[in-house]
Image (spheres, rainbow, N blue to C red):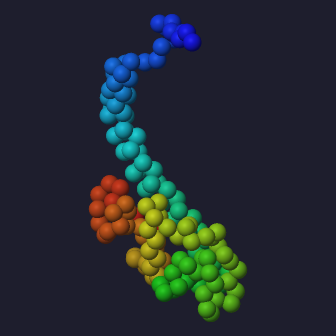
């Protein structure tokens, strides 16, 4: 059987050509990656603030229906499951337990009463899950 040789223009890439393309792509990513991933932290903080505002609104609705905010032991779970003693509870006020987690997968903290004579506060400890921090690790309080 006679073997047919492909024409010069129909052959694949050489190893050298593939290496050059990978080097070019790597160089481009080295410049773009810090910008892309730097914005992820800011986006997570904005998402955490939005979720905290949403939870605050749902707590207000619960208070209007029940007559009080959940206490510290009932916590934010009172938005999902009816606590004992809340006869007028008309929830669930949020769809599921994942709403009670910050963008980094940690549970939001709920304090009742809150600081500065506030009726409650919702806190996230940021990406590191520890008190204090800078940037993406900064604690957020609503």
Q: Residue furthest left?
A: 133
Residue 79 visible to the viewer: yes
Location of residue 85 in the rendering, given as x and y in whole percent from the top left corner: 62, 93
- The correct choice, above or below, for 40 with respect to 26 in the image is below
Q: Is residue 18 left or right of residue 112?
A: left
Q: Position of residue 13 (x, y in %)?
A: 43, 18
Work out whether residue 24 can be spotted.
no
- Where 13 sits versus 30, above or below? above
Query: Residue 111: horizontal and vertical position, in percent?
Result: 44, 79
The foreground one among 30 and 43 is 30
Q: If the image is split into quadrants, where does the N terminus sit?
A: top right
Q: Residue lying farthest front?
A: 1
**How far across and down, in percent of the image, does residue 39 sit?**
41, 45
Q: Quadrant of residue 114?
A: bottom left
Rendered residue at 40%/76% (across/down): 116
Q: Which residue is rendered at x = 44% and y = 74% of the image?
A: 109
* Picture residue at 36% right of the left edge, 27% below the top: 22
With respect to residue 13, does 62 lie above or below? below
Q: Residue at x 55, y 79 (%)?
A: 77
Closest to the observer, 50 or 23: 23
Quarter of the figure with residue 87: bottom right
């Amino acid at each position: 059987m006679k073997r047919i040789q492909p024409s010069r223009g129909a052959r694949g890439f050489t190893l050298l050509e593939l290496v050059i393309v990978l080097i070019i792509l790597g160089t481009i990513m080295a410049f773009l990656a810090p910008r892309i991933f730097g914005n992820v932290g800011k986006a997570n903080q904005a998402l955490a603030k939005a979720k905290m505002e949403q939870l605050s609104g749902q707590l207000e609705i619960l208070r209007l229906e029940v007559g009080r905010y959940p206490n510290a032991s009932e916590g934010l779970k009172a938005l999902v499951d009816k606590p004992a003693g809340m006869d007028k509870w008309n929830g669930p006020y949020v769809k599921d337990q994942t709403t009670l987690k910050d963008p980094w997968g940690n549970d939001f903290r709920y304090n009742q009463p809150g600081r500065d004579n506030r009726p409650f506060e919702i806190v996230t400890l940021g990406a590191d899950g520890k008190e204090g921090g800078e940037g993406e690790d900064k604690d957020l309080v609503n």
